[in-house]
Image: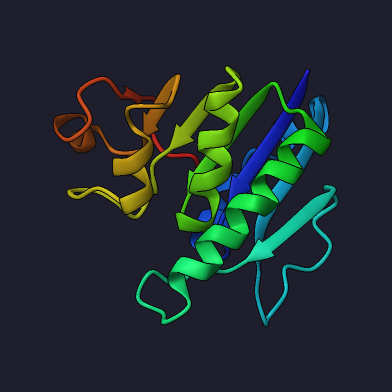
Amino acid sequence: MKLLFAASSGGHFEQIMMLKPLMKKYDSVLLTEKTDYGMGDNGVRTIYVPQINRKGILFIPKLISNTFRAIKIYHKEKPDIMITTGVLAIVPLALIVKLHRRKLVYIESFAKVTSKTLSGKLLYKFADQFYVQWESMLKLYPKAIYKGGIY
């Protein structure tokens, strides 16, 4: 079984890295955003995609470009399951995974206690399993699974 872990940079990346024991247990690859400050060597094979800012002037071209990259990445890696903490740069790949009838596991951000992330809103209806890290989030995502925080 091949697992694809995907997260943006920053806090979302920190959260996905809490699953590193799972990454080590299975054939895994990590996908994250390319940033100026770099992620360093995390001991997991990592693929980088350009960062997307939905308020940036190049939002649409970058989203289209990332979609084509996602298609290539999917066909090269052929994951059975994608586990993601979001954000926007990750959404095209998540949808491609679902189009190929693979499993999608979404973990809503630890920072979200009373409101939804944009990627959470978009992927809630597609995720095979959708986890929240705060019990209060079950009001916003009634079909979500609450198991506590990832930390």
- The one of 88 and 92 positioned closer to us in this rendering: 92
Residue 36: quadrant of the picture? bottom right
Residue 92 percent location from the top left of the image: 53, 46
Q: Is residue 3 visible?
A: yes
Q: Looking at the picture, does residue 46 appear above or below residue 28?
A: below
Q: In this orientation, which residue lies closer to the viewer: 30 or 69?
A: 69
The x, y position of residue 130, in whole percent, is 39, 27
In the image, residue 105 above or below residue 61: above
- Colouring used for the render: rainbow
- Image coords of residue 58 (percent x, y): 48, 77
For the point 22% across and 37% down, the residue is 137
At horizontal 85% and vertical 48% (from top left) the residue drawn is 45
Q: Residue at x 65, y 51 (%)?
A: 68
Residue 10 in view, yes or no: no
Position above or below: 113 against 21: below
Whether residue 63 sits left or right of residue 114 in the image: it is right
* Quarter of the rendering occupied by the N terminus: top right
The residue closer to the viewer here, 61 or 110, is: 61
Residue 140 sits above or below residue 100 on the image: below
